[in-house]
Image: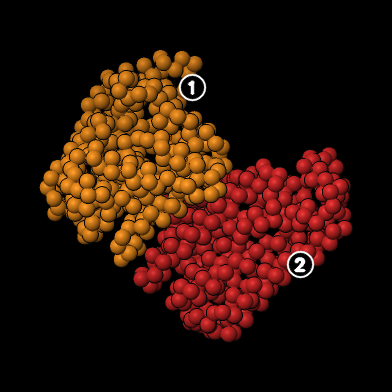
Chain colours: A orange, B red
């Protein structure tokens, strides 16, 4: 592990994690249970959450390999939630490949997901300081519960017509941002940070995570199709009440709001023109600018959280840069 | 809690647990996530696993209320596994009431189950001695992983024709007996038992748990319909390769074995006569006696395990009596 010492570059951290991951694939029996775990873990991605766990450690100490078990725990948990969410959302594809329940079957998706959740705890206990295991499990539990609650709220919103912006922000905080904050917090705790510093760092991650999700909402409607790498307007087509729609309903006058509501309840034969009509309303209300402002406000709060933490300045700078990249989906 | 001090009677222990349960129903939001947890927890049952956790404690110490959090953790975990297994098995009923995914829907079953698994860990951390939290989570993880592996083996067996008795015994050990042993082990650890004594107690529970499952197999074919409280012959109708069938295949001559295999692969129009034909073969091979002998052998091993533990004799006697009741499904 000496070769990774004193790294500051995010790509080196990704490499360190990928090394660890490749040494910890699941070889246990029965293979029908464990093979799907390796399948989803190998679908790749940027490893954002484990990178954050390692960066959370790095603010307080240089030996970041000590945080690899919590980084892996967080990545396993994240992938567990993807496997189960994809079943609930009936999603056929994940990162361009078949989802676990499509590649195998629904029962496999449920059971392999369950055992992943258990292994996340198993890796928390692999942290070399047993004195903090209880604290790590406590923090992890809180975050894991929040992620489930966020997923439930998201499902509830599909059937509700009266969701407001503050409820929506709460939902994305739980479903997405809590784990981004939790990854940083767990890393910090492994480094021996005080509970207070660790939870400030968690707040930083939450605020950055909300900005990250708002940008996701924005790009789904107004991104560059080549960069986003998926069909645009998917949220609109599925009548998802994202920040964009909720903000537009807040700002629009009665006739426009009514038109937007009607569009967002319809299952049109011509999807493309529905998306076009909704986007025109969003543009007429300057929604992209509104989203940019909201993002900036959460990023600003994140900066304040980070400033209150004593730690290595260079690592804090790296984290701030990462948060800005996240808010622009440039990571 | 003073009123429960020095209890030895199992029904008092059940009462103590039910008291705790009724004080710990889930009142959190969103209620769509938590209500199904209360629903399944209130379907009742004998509370075998929490009772065992409390009895495991009682062998080493009298203040059994200290083991209530692990007892609840074990009961939550057991119910989590029922909720997810019922989805996988497409079971409409559980204890005569609609299963969670029938009462609500499959997504609710998946997500409420997930959050139950997380809360099981939450309750392990409520044990008043934080020094053993890490050990409790470690033991719990091992057992929880075994239960998932057992469920996977059970599903694999449905598609296999070459299951042998030793594989079958391994499967029921993982799927059913591991948690029976784990409940006792966790209770003992909370009482401050040595790891060695606690794991001897776990072995006792495993062996008793295997006897318990063998009796379940036996009653499904040869029980008294009124006592069993469900349709007899269900395992045979579903072509389940239980101990009875596997033992019969081992003992039968070639023509009988071939007839039995044929019956156990068929989807007959007349289910009752299929069940009758299989039962006649089982009787002709003395399978009920074989099962009784296997049960006795596991119970005998359980007794040996228990004898090697230093602890309160009266509590060990109570536990032995319970194991015998379990092996006769008389609990």
Tell me the crowding category of disc 1: few under 14, some 14 to 19, or many 20 or more residues within 10 angstroms, Cα based.
Answer: few
Q: A78 above or below B37?
A: above
Checking the image for residue B292, the label placed there is 2
Question: In the image, what residue occupies the spot 83% across and 54% down?
Answer: B252
**Total residue callouts:** 2
Please tell me whether mark 2 sits on a helix, a strand or a loop.
helix
Observer able to see residue B85: no
Along the line of sight, the residue nearer the viewer: B306 or A167? B306
Q: Give how far across and how far down residue A98 sits, in percent.
A: 48, 31
Q: Give how far across and how far down residue B189 sits, in percent.
A: 46, 72
Checking the image for residue B124, the label placed there is none
Q: Give how far across and how far down residue B168 sits, in percent.
A: 66, 55
Pointer 1 residue? A267
Tell me the crowding category of disc 2: few under 14, some 14 to 19, or many 20 or more residues within 10 angstroms, Cα based.
Answer: some
Question: In the image, what residue occupies the spot 43% across and 52% down?
Answer: A119
> Which subunit holds the residue at mark 2?
B
Q: Give how far across and how far down residue A26 sits, in percent.
A: 45, 47
Q: A288 above or below B281?
A: above
Please tell me whether mark 1 sits on a helix, a strand or a loop.
loop
Task: Nearest to the eye among marks 1 and 2: give it.
Answer: 2
Along the line of sight, the residue nearer the viewer: B195 or B65? B195
B109 relative position to A212: left or right: right
Question: In the image, what residue occupies the spot 53% across and 49% down?
Answer: A29
B95 relative position to B27: left or right: right
Observer able to see residue B87: yes
The alpha-carbon separation of the residues under discs 1 and 2 comes to: 63 Å
């Amino acid at each position: 592990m000496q070769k990774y010492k004193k790294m500051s570059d995010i790509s080196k951290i990704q490499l360190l994690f990928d090394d660890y991951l490749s040494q910890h694939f699941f070889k246990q029996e029965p293979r029908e249970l464990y093979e799907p775990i390796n399948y989803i873990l190998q679908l790749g991605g940027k490893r954002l959450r484990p990178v954050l766990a390692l960066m959370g450690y790095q603010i307080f100490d240089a030996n970041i390999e000590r945080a690899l078990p919590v980084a892996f725990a967080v990545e396993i948990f994240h992938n567990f939630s993807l496997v189960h969410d994809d079943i609930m959302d009936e999603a056929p594809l994940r990162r361009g490949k078949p989802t676990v329940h499509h590649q195998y079957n629904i029962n496999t998706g449920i059971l392999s997901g369950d055992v992943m959740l258990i292994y996340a705890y198993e890796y928390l206990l692999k942290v070399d300081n047993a004195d903090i295991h209880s604290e790590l499990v406590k923090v992890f539990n809180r975050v894991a519960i929040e992620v489930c609650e966020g997923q439930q709220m998201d499902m509830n919103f599909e059937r509700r017509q009266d969701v407001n912006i503050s409820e929506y922000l709460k939902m994305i905080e739980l479903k997405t941002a809590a784990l981004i904050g939790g990854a940083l917090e767990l890393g910090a705790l492994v480094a021996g940070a005080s509970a207070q510093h660790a939870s400030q760092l968690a707040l930083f991650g939450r605020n950055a995570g909300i900005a990250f999700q708002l940008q996701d909402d924005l790009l789904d409607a107004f991104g560059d199709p080549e960069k986003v790498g998926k069909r645009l307007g998917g949220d609109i087509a599925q009548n998802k009440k994202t920040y964009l729609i909720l903000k537009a309903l807040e700002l629009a006058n009665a006739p426009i709001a009514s038109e937007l509501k009607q569009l967002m309840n319809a299952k049109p034969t011509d999807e493309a023109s529905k998306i076009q009509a909704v986007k025109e309303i969003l543009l007429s209300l300057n929604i992209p600018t509104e989203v940019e402002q909201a993002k900036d406000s959460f990023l600003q709060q994140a900066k304040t959280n980070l400033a209150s933490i004593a730690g290595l300045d260079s690592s804090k700078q790296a984290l701030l840069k990462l948060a800005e990249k996240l808010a622009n989906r440039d990571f």
